[in-house]
Image (spheres, helix red, strand yellow):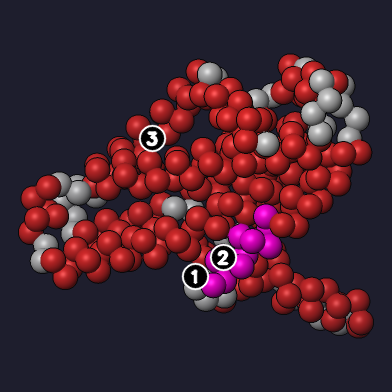
Amino acid sequence: MLNYLSAELWRMTRRRGDLLAWGVFLLLVLLVGLTYRGSTPWAVLMGFENFMVMGLYLAFPLAEWAGGGSERSGGLVNEVAFGLPRARIYLGKLFAALLVGTALFLLTAFVFFMGALSTGTVLAQSGEERAMVSAGLLLAMLRSLPRYVGAVSLACFLVFTLRPAGVGAVLYYLYITLGELVLSVSSFYGLGPVGELVNRFMALVRPFLLSSTYYGLGNVPSTLCNSWLTGALWLVLTTGLGLILFRRKEIR
C-alpha cells in the first residue's frame, strides 16, 4: 500500500495542468487575504473562518486530481489487469487525495494570513492577544479539517463509482449547495406515518451535515466533537460503500 500511495503522490505532482490550477487558486487566496490588509488580527481570523467554506467546493476537484482521469485514459484497466487489488487502488487514491488536500489546506491558511497580516500589525499585538488569535485559528482549522476529509471521501466515492465522471460532479455540487439545505430546514406535516418517518430521518442526519459548521444548518453547535464525529462517519460510510461498488464496477 505504501508503495502504491507514493506512486500516486508522484503521479499527482506530474500533472502540470492541475498544479497550475492549484497555483492560480493560491494566488486568488493571496488576493483575498490582501483585502484584509490593515485589519486587526481578530478581523482577519473571522474573514478566514468565513472563507473556509470554500474547502467543501474544492473537494471534488481534489478527488478528480487523485483519480487523474485514469478510467478515461485506461489507467484503471491497466492497474486491474496487472493484478492490483481494487481495494488498494481505491484506498490508495483516497489517501493520496487526503494527504495532498491536508497540505493544500495548511498552505491556503499560510498564504491567506501572509497576505492579510503585516509584520507591524502582528508585532503591535500583545503576547496574550497573539496567543488568543492563534488558538482561535487552530480551533477553526481543527473544526474544518474533518469535514474536508468527509467531503473528499464523498467526492472520491462519486468519482470512482459513477460513469460518466460528470455525473459525480453534478451530484456532488447539487448535494453541497441544495441537498444539505433541504435536509436542514424541511419538515413534513399531514403525511401520517410516512411524514413522521421522514422527519425523524432528517432529525437524525442534521447533526452530521458537512456544511453545518459554516452555515449553522440544523442549529447544530459546531463543536470539535461534532466535527470529528461528522468527518469520521462520512469517511467510514462513503469509503465502505465505495469499496463495495468499486469491486463490482465494470472497468473498461
**Residue drawn where x is 78% and y is 40% of the image:** 87
CB within 8 Å, label 2 to label 1: yes
- Amino acid residing under circle 3: Leu
Dot 1: within a 10 Å radius of its alpha carbon, few (fewer than 14), some, or many (20 or more) residues? some
**Looking at the rendered structure, which numbered label has been put on residue 131?**
none
Spot occupied by residue 194 in the image (x, y as percentages of width and height): 91, 76
Q: Is residue 5 above or below residue 69?
A: below
Residue 232 part of the magenta segment: yes
Q: Is residue 195 above or below residue 18?
A: below
- Which element type, helix, strand or loop, lies under badge 2? helix
Q: Quadrant of residue 251?
A: top right
Can residue 65 be seen? no
- Residues shaded magenta: 224-235
**Residue drawn where x is 64% and y is 61% of the image:** 232
**Residue drawn where x is 14% and y is 55% of the image:** 122
Query: Looking at the image, which is closer to me, 168 or 230?
Result: 230
Query: On the rendered structure, is 73 left or right of 33?
Result: right
Dot 3: within a 10 Å radius of its alpha carbon, few (fewer than 14), some, or many (20 or more) residues? some
Query: On the rendered structure, is 105 left or right of 180?
Result: left
Query: Looking at the image, which is closer to me, 89 or 83?
Result: 83
Q: Nearer the viewer, mark 1 or mark 3?
A: 1
Find disc 1 in the rendering and name its residue: 224
